[in-house]
Amino acid sequence: MDVRQPDNPLIEIRDLTVEYWQGERWNPVIEGLHLHINPAETLGLVGESGCGKSTTANALLGYRPRGARYRSGQVLFAGQDLLRLSNRALQRIRGRQISLVPQNPTTALSPGIHVGDQIVEVLMVHRYSKTVREARERTLDLLARVGLPNPPVIYKRYPHQLSGGQQQRVIIAMALACDPQLIVLDEPTTGLDVTTQAQILDLLMDLQGSYGLAMLYVTHNLGVVAQICTRIGVMYAGQLVEVAPRHVIFKQPLHPYTQGLIASVPRITAPKQVRSLLLKGLLKRGELPAGCPFAPRCDFAQERCFAEKQHLTQVSDQHAVACWRWQEIPSFAQRIAETQSAVFQKCETAGCKAGEILLKVDNLRAAYTLEHRRPFARPLPRVVVDGVSFDIQPGETFALVGESGSGKSTIARALNGFIPYVTGELRFDGKYDLTIPVDKRARDLLRALQLVFQNPDASLNPRQRISHIIGRPLQVFFGLSGAALRQRVEALLEDVRLDRSYYNRYPDELSGGERQRVAIARALAAEPKLMLCDEVLSALDVSVQANIIELLADLQAKRNLAYLFISHDLAVVRSLAHRVGVLYWGCLCEVGTTEEVFTPPFHPYTYLLLSAVPEADPDQVMPEARKDIGLIVSEEKPACPFALRCPWRDPAHCHDEPPPWQTLSRSHMLRCHIPIEELRQHDIWADRFRRA
Amino acid sequence: MVVLRILFLRVLWALITLFAVSFIIFTAIEILPGDIAARVLGRYATEEMKAEFRRMRGLDRPMLVRYGEWLSGVVRGDFGDSLVSEFNVGEVVLPKLRNTLLLALYAFILYIPFSIILGSLSAVFREGVLDTVLSSLTLIGLSIPEFVMGTLLAFIFGVVLGAFPVVVAINVARSFGEAVQMMTLPAVTLAIAMAVYAIRMLRDNLIEVLESDYVRMAILKGVPMYLVVLRHALPNALVPALNVTALNLAYLIGGVVVVEKVFAFPGIGTQLIDSVFLRDAPVVEACALIISAVYIVANLFADVMTILLNPRLRTAK
């Protein structure tokens, strides 16, 4: 497959500068970008939000979003400059020779048109198929090709009737429809479950081999590029700072930014992070120096870095880096070896007295609505969480993991009293009953149980100043005012490592990571004993994520705070949680300490989840053996909720007999019919290293 | 089957609303000041004559009894007799209703393409010359009352150009063509009055839809812009505009009062005004109830269309 000829690329971006109109002036988002994609290769483009990766993807399609302009440069494809083509000429290329797979399949499909007809549309506008009949036949083939079961049924579905993974498969079928030469994938699996993501990656890898297709894979997820890309480009502030084949990028990154980025990614196999390598500060677009944009955050910056523009320089055949000091900077391996002692450690729970329990959840069942099973019969609650039991000790982090729809967030809401139908025993701090709804709770209970949401954009009132947002719980719970209030707010800002100058700002003047810090400070203001963190890191970039993980661990150590940490990101969970509960279809299937859950024996579902995680290490290939069929929801829930999907199910009893809880240690339990000895043989880590 | 259940509930609610409205109308007219007996019998009628008149027409009985009688008649399609002319209300109102419906239909036929085309052009070429001009024009249209608009049109096209009659004596039209010509000015007035809302509404909806991911996806699939708008954008932008159209539809029947008056058009609006003036309760009640019914049916229609146009609701089980 090695057809890399730098002289003859499929598509080439030359000296591209893109600017966006922001309020009163044009601000550059991409500056002087050079990039080429060879035929049949998969180029990964990674970087944090705002680095210009999506803008690059747009440029490859000759697309100019509103408020953007191409100030200079060319995008050369088949001898033409896409930036200077007429709309009519572009129409002939888009979808025909270069096609797009966008980030969010749910919003990218037209809501009112059968998905099959949307594929037929592409075939017809490009006259790829002569007749509608022919186009329909090809569509059915394509739907089968992307692994959708029963194409004629899928054809007649509306987008909302398909799951996220199915929608993305439809989009991929659409992108493949006219046999294009290049597919631009813009964060195609962001927002999907890990298991769905793994399936989509499988499909893409399959296509790579069979079609001779070139792909540009834009993502912030380094794990994904490590698994799928042949070559990787790293972007920072609109510039390409390093390009190299994936093994080189992950093993010998030269640019300090690449080194920091790779060190920031939480690993599922090696949960310790190298603290001193983490990226410091934030990308501030408005305050970039004339020279290297990374200089303000770089450990090795010198005067020349700030003054002199950096250009990609070839350091070896396939490897280019935009840093003039690349030979002087210590190597990645060296930096890691030097700082091995300063590894990040999650706080130990040794401090808490054994047996002391902060939150006890026993047989929790929760439902949002009633369901009329039969006319005139008494309606029954439609149970989302079905008999979940766990407990949390003071100062401990308990994580709930599972796919979307498994009931993770419902548990958090039930604990907060936002769910109308709740049964079971929920005891908090010995004296409070959490089954009572939020509006009937004692003030002291409200104070001791705080919530941090996934999206700080939506959970902070945009019309309130930071001082007001953080100050409000202080006024309500502690009656503080005046100078005392101000002092306390400033102390809290310091606790979450924000500068005092933020006191009078509004949320939209802050970055995503800073806003999440404010949300954490607001929860801390109430001096809670337990904080419910619902996907608090999901919306953040890896480098910001790494810093917040550290912050959460520090706060826990200082205040003996307990977290219920809800996340779909298993690597984050591994680096932060003390104990983990794995949730499937409203039921817990495994509970144990993090080390116990993340090492064999696994519950079959835990195995499936872990094997779906793309590790940011090209040597750890995802296990091939997982033939996951995806989330199954049927009318009738079997006795073991996972029975329908379990690769090792035994039809004899998995369907009808409730599985027993098998106890492996004082802290580790899993709920499965399969004997522990048999489960012990499934080892994903062994699988990965064996194939590598 | 969710759809059927929703439809059933909506129809049920519509009937309940109509029932409530009938009661409110009846009560309102009851407490209206002014005496029908004095109106009909003239200035020189004695108290005895007025009492006799009320007794003959059954006006001296309790209100609830009369309401019950009236309602039972209405259900059977009988609105009683006009107090003034002694004709059956149906005979008085039906021809007027027919005229108004004709006018409404004409205005509606003008309104739909006019709004969709101008709204779409405005959105697709937003912030361009056409959009700016249209925005100003619709703003002007919004702020000018219909009767001024009608008068203006009547002056320009009727008086100055002489192209259309200013007074619409529809009942003496000799041919269909002549009727259409006569009704053009009031119909255009109504169409403009409705379209100014719809154009702005559709423009804003369409702009939002044009910014959506699926429209961007359609463009990046290589679909020509006119097809993007027709297939992907317009159908989704029309749904919210439907509710405006429903209100417009109701306005057409009910709010035409003033416009009919400007053109002396013998429609239900003119009839309503005249009957209120004469305190002819049965006719007023009939007109008011018909107009309310149109409002309710129009909104019901919009709800149903919204459900049918939304695949999410349509396919729910």
Image: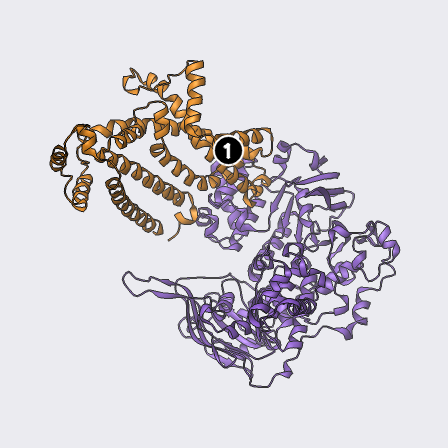
Chain colours: A purple, B orange
The percent coordinates of residue B168 (x first, y second) are 33, 20
In this rendering, the count of numbered labels is: 1
Q: Residue at 32% of width from left, 47% of height from top? A: B10
The percent coordinates of residue A47 (x first, y second) are 70, 55
Query: What residue does disc 1 label?
Result: B119
Q: Is residue B257 above or below residue A676?
A: above
The percent coordinates of residue A386 (x first, y second) are 44, 71
Q: Residue at 55% of width from left, 41% of height from top? A: B215
B168, A417: nearer the viewer: B168
Residue A302, by quadrant, is bottom right
User: What amino acid is at disc 1?
Assistant: Gly
B315, B54: nearer the viewer: B54
Residue A282, by quadrant, is bottom right
Q: Is residue A262 above or below residue A96?
A: below
Q: Is residue A380 above or below residue A175?
A: below
With A465 as the anchor, is A501 left or right in this view? right
Q: Could one spot residue A399 in this view of the protein?
A: no
With A236 as the anchor, is A418 left or right in this view? left
**Residue sitting farthest toward the bottom:** A354
Q: Could one spot residue A5 in this view of the protein?
A: yes
Disc 1 element: helix
Report in which chain the residue with disc 1 lies: B
**Callout 1 environment at 10 Å: few (<14), some (14 to 19), or many (20+)?**
many
The percent coordinates of residue B258 (x first, y second) are 36, 29
